[in-house]
Amino acid sequence: MNDPTHPFPTWDAAHAERLDEPGRLLYRSNLLGSDLRITNYGGGNTSAKLLQRDPLTQQEVEVLWVKGSGGDLGSMKLDGFSTLYLDKLRALQAIYRGPEHEDEMVGYLPHCTFNLNARAASIDTPLHAYLPFRHVDHMHPDAVIAIAAMENSRALTQTIFGGTVGWLPWRRPGFELGMQLQRHVAEHPGLRGLVLAGHGLFTWGDDARSCYENTVGVIRDAQAWLQAERRERKLVSFGGTAREPLPGDEQQSLLARLLPVLRGAVSRSGHKLAHVDRSAVVQEFVDSRDLERLAALGTSCPDHFLRTKIRPLILPASLYALQGPALAAAIEERLAAYRADYSAYYERCKRPNSPALRDPNPVIVLLPGVGMVSLAKDKATARIAGEFYVNAINVMREADALDRYVGLPEQEAFDIEYWLLEEAKLQRMPKPKPLVGQVALVTGGAGGIGRAIVERLLGEGACAVLLDIDTEALAQVGDGLRARFGRDVVRTLRCDVTDEAGVLRAYADAVTEYGGVDILVSNAGIASAAPIEDTTLELWMRNQSILSTGYFLVGREAFRVMKAQGIGGAIVFIASKNGMVASNQASAYCAAKASEIQLARCFALEGAPLGIRANVVNPDAVIRGSKIWTGTWSQERAAANKIKEEELEAFYRDRSMLKRSVLPQDIAEATYFFASDLSAKSTGNILNVDAGNLAAFPR
């Protein structure tokens, strides 16, 4: 399970020795969070009870450092820890009114804050505060959760760890569980850890290193027992194989056809993005005999179903042969059944004060023969949901093979999913940016204008797929954008827009990465100049191929994907002032740019009934940062206008009505207008960004 033979991260004693106590706590946390076999993204907590000087009394006091609300152990910094007076936390036990009132205790945690720390304390704070150990880890390792999710979890915990690890029945995190932990270790001295049924693992130590080594030691012991039992009993995972996975090329073709339909169907109330996982562990599960039985049982760990819903949707392989409307109808039928089932679950389990029903669409969709698709409002959330379900798969594999897998009772699952404290956290989240959940495909993405456009769209929350023929520039620009905006939201693909097969592959890859395309910015370009009698057929055809045929090919594929999604879309062509008014000695370029403008109008005409808008941005004389001016174009335009090359920017600026230079960022702003809902009622339009040119006024 996640390669148990691979060693856990090693504690670097020399590095740790150079750190202070909070630094060693952070080091331990990052080390634990770096390995998904130990805990999943955003899951788990670490803590340390440290002596610090009280800023008010100047006396030394005990302070609990514990991972605060939100954040991820693997990537957190020191500001990710809450700090609380330990004596005040302990004093809260005197005013605790019992399990039916435990949620009110969360409101007291801010009153225990040490040194005005702004990091909010999490619901798990009492679980760390009331254990009598200096250093405590609470992890969600697959190996231990597998044991915690077995029907005979208590007896097996005793057997596996020889009585050195305790066991507690399921209870959701909170003040009462903290009290139970405190009582249990007091009644069972000498334990090295505690398994919480259906939940996870608590371990501890006297210092940061011993705590870390105890944590990985318990997990290693659990892994070793699972492996030994599996070998000795010659166990088969998930009841054995029911079918073989499809060949890779067939999977890719199917995903390119199916994902836009699926994504569109779950995005009617708001855009969602997809993440595809075709790893061996996922394929083993989706192609197994016990897939339907185990998937229906739901997950066990609270973190799992908070991210993935209580159970996934399985799309049967019988759908794969369908095309067009038949495929859309079949997927919608399955989704409708899932939504009805989820709504019934809500009605069965809701409390008088439960939050309203949330989006009833699935988060996890399993595709036999292919893998898993996870769906969420942004790419990172979709990816992380998929990672959590992989954890759930690992748990089911071991628990059901060695004993009997037991998911959480439905009511318990509901009470976690619709916990008022979780709802309050959701309500505090900031309003999403306008393009969150949308995918923009930008051709010529490695150029100056292309990069500026991508930066603008990423800044508003979109994901971006950059296409360019310049491999080196594409890699450089992609690396810079990922460093700035994050690895989840940027993809780069080499693509020659004049190559139909290459364009089809690029769209298939983009769809597999994100689920579809919502915005096309067709920006790939060249520039050329020559008197008509010196314009060769080769030069003419090169302009037509890139600026007309290329725009048709990428536009046609965007149109097909957007139509399949059924949620509209925006197509923006970056044309030129030269498409409106001819320039001297640039016939091939001007004719191709005019073709772009007319082509955009055709897309607008056919796209309107589908909610697909098509508009044009016409730049002029974007010299700074634009790649087309780095070749012979600047020399040719200088010669045509009888000026020196270094005088070009001033020449174009001064000939404009506003006497202003046009920059790539100006084109990006106009593009964002047409790509976003700011222009929701505009299609077939042209926006000149040329600082004013009377001859180019649209008529």
Image (cartoon, rainbow, N blue to C red):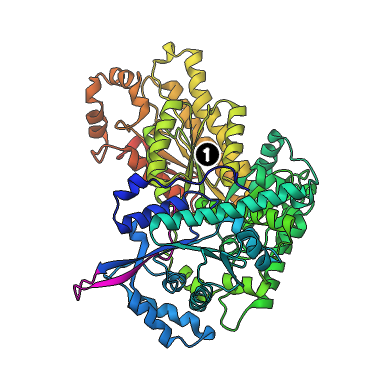
Q: Is 66 on the left or on the right of 222, as rendered?
A: left
| Residue 172 forms part of the magenta stretch | no
Q: Which residue is mark 1?
A: 600
Q: Position of residue 670 (x, y in %)?
A: 39, 45
Q: Quadrant for residue 508, please give it.
A: top right
Residue 307 coordinates in the image, percent (x, y): 57, 60
Q: Residue at x 45, y 60 (%)?
A: 432
Question: Over which residues does the magenta segment extend?
Answer: 53-74
Does residue 145 appear in this view? yes
Q: Can you say which quadrant of the picture contains the C terminus?
A: top left
| Amino acid type shown at disc 1 | Ala
Q: Nearer the viewer, residue 353 or 586?
A: 353
Residue 377 in the image, given as x and y percentages of width and height: 53, 56
> Which of the pair 586/164 is nearer the observer?
164
Badge 1: how crowded within 10 Å, few (<14), some, or many (20+)?
A: many
Rendered image quadrant of residue 133: bottom left
Q: Residue at x 74, y 62 (%)?
A: 404
What secondary structure is marked by label 1? Answer: helix
